[in-house]
Image (spheres, helix red, strand yellow):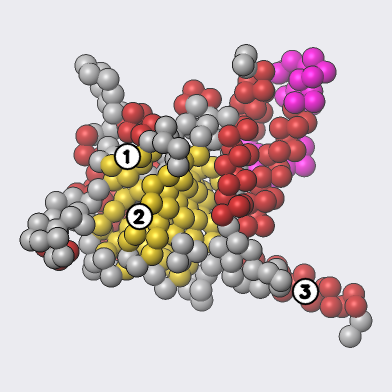
C-alpha cells in the first residue's frame, strides 16, 4: 500500500472515531425534545433541557451535574427514572445560570441525602433531599441580601459550598465507587464556575467554560474574563487524556460541555486556540488605537464566525467581541 493511502485511511478512521466519540454503541433517545445518550455503562448525558446534564449511576445512587431549566425539570426527572430506580443522592452545579440550576429544586426534593438516619453504615435509611454542591459565588448569586428578592426559590439554592478562597480551590468526594473532584475556575465564564472530574469514568463535565454551539459567553458583570476562560480551558486540557499513540482511536477522556456535542481533548484544544487567536487579534487592534466600533467592522472573528457566530439571540458575535475588548481595555 502506498504511503499516501495509509494517511488517507488514518484520517478517515480519525474522523469516524470522532463522530462516534463517547456513544458506546447507543443512539440518542428523544423525548419531547430531550435526548439521552449513554456515554459509559454508568454514565449518561441528558440534552435539550437547557444546559447539558450529566448523570452518573452507581451502587450508592445517582449523581447529577447541572439540572437544566425549571420548565423541563419534570421531564428530566422522568428521564432519570427511566435510567435507574436508584435515588438521586447528589447534585453539583457548574454555575448559577438559570439553564444550569433551574431544575435544582425538583430534582433535590425528589432525591435522598446520603447521610443515613438509621446508623452510620445504613445508607438505605438515608432520607431528606439530595444535597446541592456549588462554589460559594453560585450561592451568593442564587440568593439575595436581607430584604431583597432572591432570583431563585430557597429550595434551589446550594446546600453545600466550597470556597474559592481556599488554597486548593477544589472539593473532593467519593461517590459510587469513584473519586469525584470539583475544581474552581476563577473569572472564566463567570466568577463561580466549576468543572467536575469523574476519575474512574474518565469524564469531565465543564459547564459553560466550553460551549461548542457559539463563542464563549464571557459575563463581565458576573466576573468573567477572556483570560480566565483561556486559563480554564488550559486546565481542562491538562486534566483530559488523549488516546495515544493512535490518536484516531476512540477513547480518552470524555468532555461534556455546557451546550453542544460531546468533546475529546483535541476538541478542547481547538476551542482554546480559537479564543486565543481572536483575543490576540483584538489585543493587536487595541494597541493600534482602534475603537470598539472599528474593531467590530474589521471582523476579528473572521474564519470562525460561520462555525460559532450569530447575529441574533442572547449571545451574538458582536457581544463576544465587545466582552473581549472591554476585558482587555479595563483599568487594572
- Location of residue 211 with respect to 125 vertically, above or below: above
Is 245 on the left or on the right of 30, as rendered? right
With 17 as the anchor, is 136 left or right in this view? left
What residue range appears in magenta? 283-310
Crowding near the residue tagged with mark 1, few <14, some 14–19, many ≥20 C-alpha atoms within 10 Å: some
Q: Residue at x 35, y 39 (%)?
A: 162
Q: Quadrant of residue 137?
A: top left
Q: Identify the residue shown where x is 77% and y is 74%.
A: 10
Q: Is residue 181 above or below residue 273?
A: below
Bin the neighbour count of mark 2 within 10 Å (Cα to Cα): few under 14, some 14-19, many 20 and up. Answer: few
Front residue of 144 and 228? 228
Instruction: Tell me if 264 is positioned left or right of 294 in this view.
Output: left
- The span from disc 1 to disc 3 (Cα, nearest Å) is 46 Å
Q: Earlier in the sequence, mark 1 or mark 3?
A: 3
- SS category of the residue bearing label 1: strand
Q: SS class of the residue under badge 3? A: helix
Dot placed on the residue nearer the N-terminal end, 1 or 2: 1
According to the image, label 1 marks what residue? 161
Q: CA distance from mark 2 to mark 3?
A: 40 Å
Pick out the residue farthest to the left.
118
Disc on res. 173: 2
Quarter the N terminus occupies: bottom right
Residue under circle 3? Answer: 10
Spot occupied by residue 154 in the image (x, y as percentages of width and height): 22, 34
Q: Quadrant of residue 35?
A: bottom left
Circle 3 packing at 10 Å, graded few (<14), some (14-19), many (20+), is some
Q: Are marks 2 and 3 in contact (CB under 8 Å)?
A: no
Q: Quadrant of the C terminus?
A: top right
Give the number of the mark in front: 2 or 3: 2
The alpha-carbon separation of the residues under discs 1 and 2 comes to: 13 Å
| Residue 235 locus on image (x, y percent) | 58, 47
Amino acid at each position: 500500500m502506498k504511503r499516501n493511502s495509509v494517511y488517507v485511511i488514518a484520517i478517515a478512521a480519525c474522523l469516524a472515531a470522532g463522530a462516534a466519540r463517547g456513544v458506546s454503541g447507543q443512539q440518542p433517545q428523544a423525548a419531547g425534545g430531550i435526548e439521552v445518550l449513554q456515554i459509559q455503562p454508568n454514565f449518561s448525558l441528558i440534552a435539550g433541557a437547557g444546559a447539558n446534564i450529566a448523570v452518573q449511576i452507581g451502587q450508592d445512587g445517582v449523581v447529577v451535574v447541572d439540572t437544566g431549566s425549571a420548565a423541563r425539570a419534570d421531564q428530566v426527572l422522568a428521564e432519570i427514572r427511566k435510567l435507574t430506580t436508584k435515588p438521586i443522592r447528589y447534585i453539583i452545579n457548574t454555575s448559577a445560570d438559570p439553564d444550569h440550576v433551574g431544575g435544582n429544586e425538583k430534582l433535590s426534593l425528589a432525591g435522598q441525602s446520603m447521610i443515613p438516619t438509621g446508623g452510620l453504615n445504613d445508607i438505605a435509611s438515608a432520607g431528606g433531599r439530595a444535597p446541592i454542591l456549588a462554589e460559594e459565588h453560585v450561592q451568593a448569586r442564587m440568593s439575595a441580601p436581607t430584604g431583597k428578592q432572591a432570583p431563585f426559590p430557597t429550595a434551589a439554592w446550594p446546600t453545600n459550598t466550597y470556597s474559592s478562597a481556599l488554597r486548593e480551590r477544589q472539593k473532593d468526594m467519593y461517590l459510587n465507587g469513584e473519586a469525584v473532584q470539583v475544581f474552581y475556575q476563577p473569572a472564566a465564564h463567570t466568577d463561580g464556575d466549576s468543572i467536575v472530574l469523574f476519575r474512574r469514568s474518565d469524564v469531565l463535565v465543564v459547564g459553560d467554560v466550553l460551549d461548542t454551539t457559539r463563542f464563549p459567553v464571557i459575563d463581565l458583570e458576573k466576573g468573567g474574563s477572556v483570560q480566565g476562560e483561556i486559563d480554564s480551558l488550559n486546565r481542562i486540557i491538562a486534566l483530559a487524556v488523549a488516546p495515544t499513540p493512535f490518536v484516531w482511536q476512540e477513547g480518552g477522556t470524555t468532555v461534556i460541555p455546557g451546550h453542544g456535542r460531546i468533546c475529546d481533548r483535541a476538541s478542547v484544544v481547538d476551542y482554546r486556540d480559537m479564543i486565543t487567536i481572536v483575543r490576540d487579534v483584538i489585543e493587536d487592534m487595541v494597541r493600534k488605537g482602534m475603537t470598539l466600533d472599528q474593531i467590530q467592522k474589521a471582523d476579528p472573528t473572521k474564519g470562525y464566525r460561520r462555525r460559532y457566530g450569530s447575529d441574533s439571540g442572547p449571545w451574538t458575535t458582536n457581544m463576544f467581541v465587545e466582552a473581549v475588548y472591554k476585558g482587555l481595555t479595563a483599568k487594572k
